Image (tube, rainbow, N blue to C red):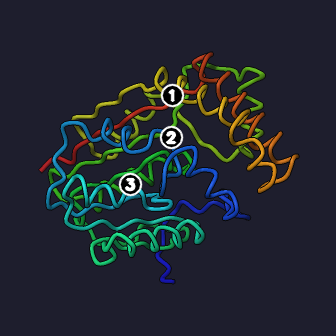
Amino acid sequence: MENETADFQIEDDDYYPKSHLSIFEKLWGKGFLSPGGPEEISEILSGIDLKNKRILDIGCGMGGIDLLLIQKYGAAEVVGIDVEAPVLEKAKLYALEAGLNKSIQFKLVEPGPLSFDDVSFDVVFSKDALLHISDKPMLFSEIFRVLKPEGLFVAGDWLRGEYKELSEQMALFNKLSDEEFDMVTLKDYESKLMKSGFSDIVLRDRHNWYLGVAERELKRIQGPLKDEIIETAGLQSYEDDWLLFWQVLVNTLTSGEFRPAHIKATKDP
């Protein structure tokens, strides 16, 4: 598999173990590694024309979104990059099954600047992946660099509220995620995008929507999916990585400390 260079490596073991991928798909849909499925992609892309565009998808996961970008939204070409080989194996298989393997490229990436030419994409897209990247100024500068003039950065990302000190539940949320998430506030996100050169920046808080989704997911984890998770991952993993994590997730959403958002920004001509 071809290796590219990019500064968003998830270190150590895979964040999404291969054995767990089928459970994630039962929660979120075939080829999806984040909440909301095709309906949430439609929300993110509302009012955006992707016809005949060349798109970079950062953190493409199992490629379900990339198939949609071609099939539903008319993109000409999608390049999906991710740090984990198991999810890319699934993505390549799904693209081949859909007959889209010539329109979609999937690349395994390693730390470092994006190894794409300047002004080489019409749109840079990402869904719930950029929270893994701590150096936001570098990331946004790289996205700006590879976008064509009038190009768009469009994303869903996990952000945080305007708190100064962590609550007990938010501290536990960070611990359960291995301190791996780097979430900034909406104001910080906007400021860093502006400093990277972006304009027409719009951030849309999706906290209320995701609270309802997470509550429904928790019920499925406690009920229909419980036995499968235990069989696949073991009882300890079920209790810590699934049940407790989702309980804490709901609590941090309820308190407003965890605030997912949609982002749209433009590179001026």
Q: Residue furthest bottom?
A: 1
Near mark 3 (Cα within 10 A), the count class, few <14, some 14-19 or many ≥20, is many
> What residue is rendered at 45% in x and 54% in y?
138
151 is higher (above) or lower (below) than 87: above
- Label 2 and label 3: CA atoms lie apart by 12 Å
- Which residue matches tag 2? 35
Q: How many marks?
A: 3
- Residue 194 visible in image: no
Q: Give the amino acid type for the residue marked by disc 2 in the picture.
A: Pro
Earlier in the chain: of badge 2 and badge 3, it is 2
> What residue is rendered at 61% in x and 17% in y?
254
> What residue is rendered at 50% in x and 50% in y?
129
Question: Image quadrant of residue 231?
Answer: bottom right
Q: Secondary structure at mark 3?
A: helix
Q: Secondary structure at mark 2?
A: loop
- Which residue matches tag 1? 210
**Observer-nearest of 96 and 190:** 96
Q: Position of residue 161 (x, y in %)?
A: 55, 22
- Which residue matches tag 3? 65
Q: Position of residue 236 (x, y in %)?
A: 88, 46
Q: Position of residue 90 (x, y in %)?
A: 52, 68
- Residue 176 visible in image: yes
252 is higher (above) or lower (below) than 147: above
Near mark 1 (Cα within 10 A), the count class, few <14, some 14-19 or many ≥20, is many
Earlier in the chain: of badge 1 and badge 2, it is 2
Check contact, mark 1 vs mark 2: CB within 8 A: yes
